Amino acid sequence: QLQLVESGGGLVQPGGSLRLSCAASGFTLDRYAIGWFRQAPGKEREGVSCISANGDYTYYADFVKGRFTISRHNAKNTAYLQMNSLKTEDIAVYYCAADRVVAGCGLNEYKYWGQGTQVTVSS
């Protein structure tokens, strides 16, 4: 059965960095698009960044452009989200998602989801 496990969340100061990882088990990620989503307290879950199966296409939400970078290492069956210049506005639970046929970065386009990892930004 397909499983995604996020890791790398934690507490950082404003302006700091974190790298989130999304490890897949029970399947290989090389034919799956990957998306990162987040849900802040009191807010709806929203798309952060997505990457196509072969890595040729990436999407970034406006609020993370220039700060976050999505990548994948298919040989390791893992995807990543490098987060730099973190702000208090980035506080959220971050989720990794995957699906075989995804054209964009919409919440409803992804079928398989991890359980999330908490990112906290505070001085």
Image: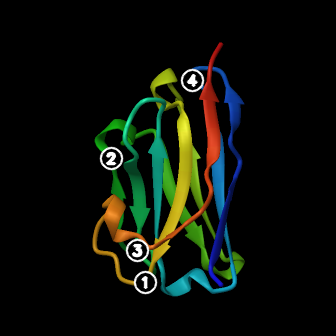
N-term mark: 4 or 3 = 4
Q: Nearer the viewer, mark 1 or mark 2?
A: 1
- Decide: is 59 above or below 57: above
Q: Work out how far the residue at label 2 is from the one at label 4, CA to CA, in angstroms.
A: 19 Å
Residue that lies at the very extreme toward the front in this rendered image:
42
Q: Position of residue 20 (x, y in %)?
A: 64, 51
What type is the residue that disc 4 sits on? Gly
At mark 4, the secondary structure is loop
Residue 17 showing in the rendered view: no
Q: How many marks?
A: 4
- Camera-near label (2 vs 4) is 2
* Numbered tag placed on residue 8 in the rendering: none
Q: Which residue is mark 4?
A: 15
Name the residue at 32% across, 46% down. 61
Q: Amino acid at mark 1?
A: Arg
Q: Quadrant of the N terminus?
A: bottom right
